[in-house]
Image: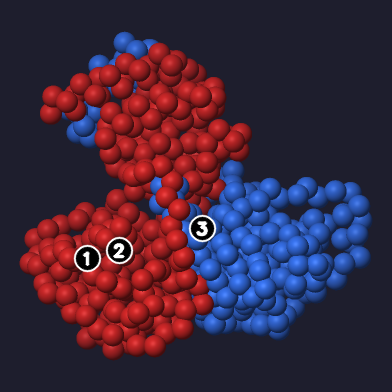
Amino acid sequence: MAGILVYAEVRNGAVRKASLEAVSEAARLTKELGGSVSAVLVGAAPANAGEVLGKAGASEVIALAGPKFTQYSGDGYAAAIHKVAAQMQPTAIFVASTPQGKDLAPQVAVLTHAGVASDCVGFTVAGGKLLAKRPVYAGKATLTVKAAESLLVATLRPNVFAQTDAGAPVAVTTREAGEVSLRAVVKEVLAAVANKLDVTEAPVVVSGGRGMKGPEHWGLLEALATAFGNAAVGASRAVVDAGWRPHDEQVGQTGKTVSPTLYIACGISGAIQHLAGMSSSRVIVAINKDPEAPIFKVADYGIVGDVFEVLPVLTEEVRRLRAAS
Amino acid sequence: MDVAVCVKRVPSTDTRVKVGASGTSIDPTGVQYELNPFDEFAVEEALRVKEKTGGGTVTVICLGPGDAQKELRNELARGADKAVLLKDDQLEARDAYSIARALADQIQKLNVRVVMMGKQAVDRDNGHVGSMVAAMLGYACVTEVVKMEIQGDTARCEREIEGGAREVVEAQLPAVFTAQKGLNEPRYVKLPGIMAAKKKPLEEVAAPAVAPKLTVVEMSLPPARQAGRFMGKGKEAVPELLRRLREESKVL
């Protein structure tokens, strides 16, 4: 059977949005490629899994059950998914490019003798073959790749592909995964700040650089992020290396590459490594004292000024706008 | 405990990327190379594993051109004991699978319990080679590790997930670990290390040819962003900014 197999990642009892985006993109592509979309999840299926995955475009949802699958195991999950893939013979396997997906996809690929197109931001079909576009050099260039043989495994960058809901809910089929040995297993999850959005997944990112003058001023950025309601706080490499912020917030070539709808750079001059990591954002706003700062060369809208003066006013105005809407 | 650590020589992160004549990889003219930044954390952790377990050999492996001897020599100076260069002047023609296969074959010969790598190379940005090597060898794998401790045959690691949360992962050795920034503070190379490195073994062998699973159709540059407009100076510019965000780009 042709078609696309999509791994549906479950966290905190829900299918992740990035996985629903992957299902929707797969559904769009199968209209040209033929076949249908099968979603596979490992462990207990959330109560609404059939509904959300079906609406996003899956024709079937398979839950792989096994007594050991209460926590994530890269090798265990890969072995289970490989069994489904071997039966189904899909033309592609899609996985959301999340910390779990990036760990899992290459292991699935080796078992299925395929290559992985990583962190894809676009797909086209040409001559019946799937072409994947993916950024390299943190976004300084884009590669278009295809599978040399039949199967392509791809991870899809969150927040890039539209999640649709035109499909119909489907029933979840539970299958026994069979015996798999687990070599690496998650034992527990240490939560950080409750409900902190990741910079790679947030629709709005508010980032601070050395112009913020010290970690004690980060409250200004957090207040703006809170005013937006759906924003994550990011940081430049300089402030991470200075120990002001944890490195999981770093945006740039040795940090994370982000493509939010709106990126607001505050007191960031714009080193080439930082620009590479955020230039694919849809709209960029820069606030900086120095009108010659390189960040203004990629910003759609710039304010020349002191972040300490601009940020509180901006926060207040955003809060008022959102309260009114 | 014997440890293998895989490193890559990559264009330095301040490189301005241009597409080369092949149309499928970068133009190497004028490009400066350096050790992949994440690999420094991998080498440091390899040295620490050796030190904490009371000795052993740290072998650094690099798949790359002859010029990568320089990067390998530097890691010997940092404290690694041996180096192997899997020489390949056509590195750009390989995908992660092809690189992983060549590394896995070499690692198997070394018979180590712990394999370290950087979490991804900052040129191709795949982040696949560690997981692939593990799957090829049947080893456990923990990626993007920010903390690790080995007790007997078990490694207890922390890896980063979304929003600063961490997963605690237990892995049975042998295992591959990929290092995330924050795992450790890499030690500096010192002069006695540089002197000692000159006498350490650096073996050069031809990398096995492995057909890639992915074909690069083309490399392109993203459309250049046009510099936008200044909304004005200071806080007086805020209303105009918000009006544009709402009416022009419709993101509010």
| Secondary structure of residue under mark 1 | loop
Tell me whether the residue at label 1 lies in contact with that at label 2, contact meaning CB atoms closer than 8 angstroms. Answer: yes
Q: Nearer the viewer, mark 1 or mark 3?
A: 1
Mark 1 to mark 2: distance in Å? 8 Å
**Mark seen at residue B159:** 3
- The number of numbered discs placed on residues in the rendered structure image is 3
- Callout 2, which amino acid? Val
Which residue does the numbered mark 1 point to in the structure image?
A46
Q: Position of residue A177 (x, y in %)?
A: 32, 84
Q: Position of residue B191 (x, y in %)?
A: 89, 49
Is disc 1 in the same subunit as disc 3? Answer: no
Left or right of residue B187, residue A282 in this image: left
Which residue does the numbered mark 2 point to in the structure image?
A10
> Chain B takes which shade in the image?
blue
Q: Where B47 falls versus A171 (above or below)?
A: above
Is disc 2 in the same subunit as disc 3? Answer: no
Q: Which quarter of the picture shows residue A89?
A: bottom left
Q: Nearer the viewer, mark 1 or mark 2?
A: 1
